[in-house]
Amino acid sequence: MGGSWCHRERLSLYLVLGLLLPGWGSTFTIKCTKFGQHGAYPTLLDSVFDRKAFRPTANFSIPTLINISFTLSAILGVNEQLQLLSSFLWLEMVWDNPFIRWNPEECANITKISVGTENLWLPNIFITEFMDVDKTPKGLKAYISNEGRITYKKPMKVVSICNLDIFYFPFDQQNCTLTFSSLLHTVDYMLLGMEKEVWEMAQTSRDIVQTRGEWELLGIYKATSKMSVGTSQYDQILFYVAIRRRPSLYVINLLVPSGFLVAIDALSFYIPAENESRAPFKMTLLLGYNVFLLMMNDLLPTSGTPLISVYFALCLSLMVVSLLETVFITHLLHLATTQPPPMPWWLHSLLLHCTSLRKCCPTAPQKGNKDLGLTLAHLSAVKEPVELAGKVPGPRKAELNEFPGSTRARQEDGAQKQHLVSLWVQFSHSIDTLLFRLYLLFLAVSVVTVVILWNT
């Protein structure tokens, strides 16, 4: 066993030494006869290592074809502020060395050997979007087949620039590019090809890709083009990596709590406007919503204006408008029960238009003391205005009894004021109903939008 192992090791060494032996203009077939009968010649190793500085080709006018492929094994993260995509991939490069050939039947059926990459010529393939230092580990190996085909695989942590569109966050999809090109050899000396089909690369990557639970790989697509720099042209291959964010984390931690707070604020409209606890309740909800936004701020993108930020701004605006409306109605009801102001004609017409099912357009208010067609049902929760029911102090009762015309005037004035109070109460309830329906419409549109974005 020991002798066979040593024989294979010496055989592999001699196969590597054959890299030096051929001439520059033709291929060379390594002869395995009498291998192992003589020791290795150290002087030949130095010559082999010297040959790695030259592009392995029998004719320098013929470009070397480099077939590349990669497997995306992990999506480490996306930095929206810096517009960067961090990923981990295995890059595979395959090319032919015409000076390495041997017959496996004459060489103990050996069809493949591994050689340290420091002893071989390696193509300088770069990723154009790369924004970090290449930290590929040293001392990697490459495989050489008996036909002279060299296969080199290396792991890479790629931090690449990517034009991120976060408007639909957290339902966004990103399309990042990885451009493989050689910035040293023009198309006259190096061409790029595909070692695997792009669908095969995408399928393999989807099978083994690992994420931190936020991103999933949708697919990998390819495009080829030439890059011109002055009068020189360089071959390049563009890969489009399509990824999608998993929105479950953000829906549960952001959208659902926000929707609950807005729904509770909408239900607060069932608290009568005359109740003194309605305004403090809405103020407490508003303060709680602001605390919620401060706590969840770390989950939001720090650059741009995503759609979810617009949603939060609308929720906050609705809650502020609701609080202001409650303060306004409370003040209005207070005035209506003490000294009701006259209602403008346009507001009266609008109120008639909104409350009467018979009328199709607003009409001007009737002058005089005619009935305006509005009931006093809304006065049940409002206290009667002081001195509006025709009651007068006792000492003047006899005097008023002597003047029945004056008594009728006061009664008519009290009835007008009562009717004016009812108008302002109905106006306040109409505002409440309008804002409540606006809340329901906003919640319905929000739910439908979330469902559509999640499914598409």
Image (cartoon, rainbow, N blue to C red):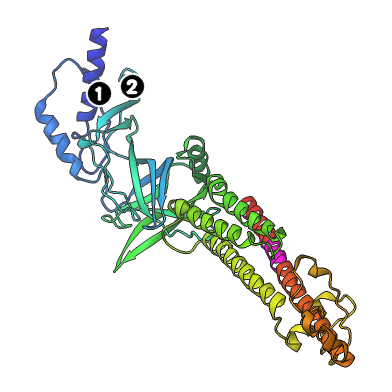
* Vertical side of 183 occupied by 39: above or below: above
Q: Which residue is drawn at 74% across and 83% down?
A: 347
Q: Do residues under tags 1 and 2 come within 8 Å of each other at their CB atoms?
A: yes
Q: Residue furthest left?
A: 43
Would residue 191 be found to the left or right of residue 25 on screen? Answer: right
- In front of the other: 74 or 112: 74
Say which amino acid is labelled 2.
Ile
User: Where on the picture, by quarter, is residue 320?
Assistant: bottom right
Residue 12 shows which numbered tag? 1
Q: Position of residue 155 (x, y in %)?
A: 34, 38
Q: Could you tell me which residue is drawn at 41 percent across and 56 percent down?
A: 80
Q: Tally the numbered discs.
A: 2
Residue 443 image-quadrant placement:
bottom right
Which is more toward the observer, 142 or 367?
Answer: 367
Quadrant housing residue 405:
bottom right
Q: What residue type is labelled 1?
A: Ser
Asked if residue 436 is among those painted magenta in the image, a careful observer would answer yes
Give the distance between the C-alpha atoms of the residues marked 1 and 2, in whole angstroms: 9 Å
Asked if residue 274 lies left or right of residue 146, the reply is right
Residue span colored magenta: 435-442
Q: Position of residue 219 (x, y in %)?
A: 52, 47
The N terminus: image quadrant: top left
Q: Nearer the viewer, residue 292 or 301?
A: 292
Residue drawn at (28%, 46%) of the image: 123
SS state under label 1: helix
Q: In this view, does 28 lie to the left or right of 41?
A: right
Residue 110 image label: 2
Mark 2 secondary-structure assignment: loop
In this rendering, does residue 169 appear at all? Answer: no
Would you place residue 114 above or below residue 288 in this image?
above
